[in-house]
Image (tube, rainbow, N blue to C red):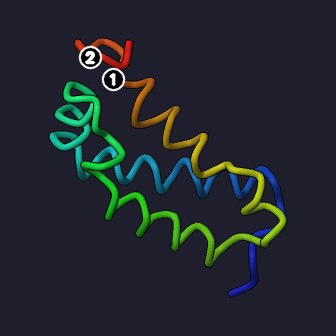
Amino acid sequence: MALIESEEAARRLARAIASDLSLYNDEKIVQGVQEDNLFEALAEEIEEGRALYKSRVSPQLYQRNFYDRALVDILIKSKGHLKSRMW
């Protein structure tokens, strides 16, 4: 499979992976936000997603940090209504 070279396609892939993380790990995410340890609670899942993302996009696009931005947008911003020390 050819590597993704398009910025838009790389962003879509990053958001799709983050959405899957959110869908399949909602309880862990809620607990992680509430206890201010989200990235520790989901470390394994996040790194698995990162490895998938890295394997699918060009090195230049990987360095653009789209995956981490998608994690913040989808995993954290969507849980802004929860009580947390983070905010």
Q: Residues within 10 Å of mark 2 (few under 14, many from 20)?
A: some
Percent x, y for residue 16? 51, 53
- Identify which amino acid the numbered label 2 is placed on: Ser
User: With respect to residue 52, does 46 lie above or below?
Assistant: above
**Residue holding disc 2:** 84
User: Which percent across, then down, holds residue 65?
Assistant: 69, 50
Question: Which residue occupies 38% across, 12% down?
Answer: 87
Q: Around disc 1, counting alpha carbons within 10 Å, would you say few (fewer than 14), some (14 to 19), or many (20 or more)?
A: some
Q: State how many labels appear.
A: 2
Q: Are marks 1 and 2 in contact (CB under 8 Å)?
A: yes
Pointer 1 or 2: first along the chain: 1
Q: Quadrant of the N terminus?
A: bottom right
| Residue 61, position as x, y percentages in the image | 79, 61
Q: In percent of the image, x 78 and y 71: which residue is there?
A: 59
Residue 39 is tagged as none
Name the residue located 24 percent from the left edge and 52 percent from the top edge. Answer: 24
Q: Is residue 77 above or below residue 26?
A: above
Q: For mark 1, what is the residue?
A: 79
Q: Closer to the camera, 30 or 9?
A: 30
**SS for dot 1:** helix
Rendered location of residue 8, percent (x, y): 77, 50
Disc 2, SS: loop
- Classify 68 as above or below 52: above
- The residue type indicated by label 1 comes to Lys
Measured Cα–Cα span from mark 1 to mark 2: 10 Å
Q: In the displayed structure, does residue 78 sit left or right of residue 7?
A: left
Would you place residue 1 above or below residue 23 in this image? below
The residue at 36%/19% (across/down) is: 86
